[in-house]
Every structure is written in C-alpha cells, then in structure tokens.
Image (tube, grey):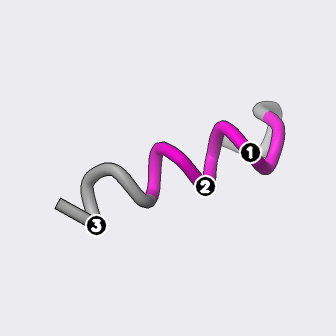
Amino acid sequence: MASLPSGASSLMLKAPLGS
C-alpha cells in the first residue's frame, strides 16, 4: 500500500474496518 496514495489506502482501510 506504500506505493498507493494516502487517500487510496485510507479508503481501503475504512471500507473493511468501517463496515
């Protein structure tokens, strides 16, 4: 995920953790 922008990583983390 380091290669991806912070925005993308945050969304990917929020999706599984949020739901």
Magenta stretch prevailing secondary structure:
helix
- Mark 2 and mark 3 lie on one chain; the one further toward the N terminus is 2
Name the residue tied to disc 1: 7
- Quarter where residue 17 is shown: bottom left
At label 1, the amino acid type is Gly
The reply to whether the C-beta atoms of the residues labelled 3 and 1 are less than 8 Å apart is no
In the displayed structure, does residue 8 sit left or right of residue 3?
left
In the displayed structure, does residue 1 sit left or right of residue 11?
right
Image location (x, y in percent) of residue 19? 17, 60
Q: Is mark 1 on a helix, strand or loop?
A: helix
- Alpha carbons under labels 2 and 3: distance apart: 10 Å
The reply to whether the C-beta atoms of the residues labelled 2 and 3 are less than 8 Å apart is no
> What residue do we see at 45% from left, 57% from top?
13
The reply to whether the C-beta atoms of the residues labelled 1 and 2 are less than 8 Å apart is yes
Q: Quadrant of the N terminus?
A: top right
Q: Is residue 15 above or below residue 3?
A: below
In the displayed structure, does residue 17 sit left or right of residue 2?
left
At label 3, the amino acid type is Leu
Q: Hey, which residue is sitting farthest bottom in the picture?
A: 17
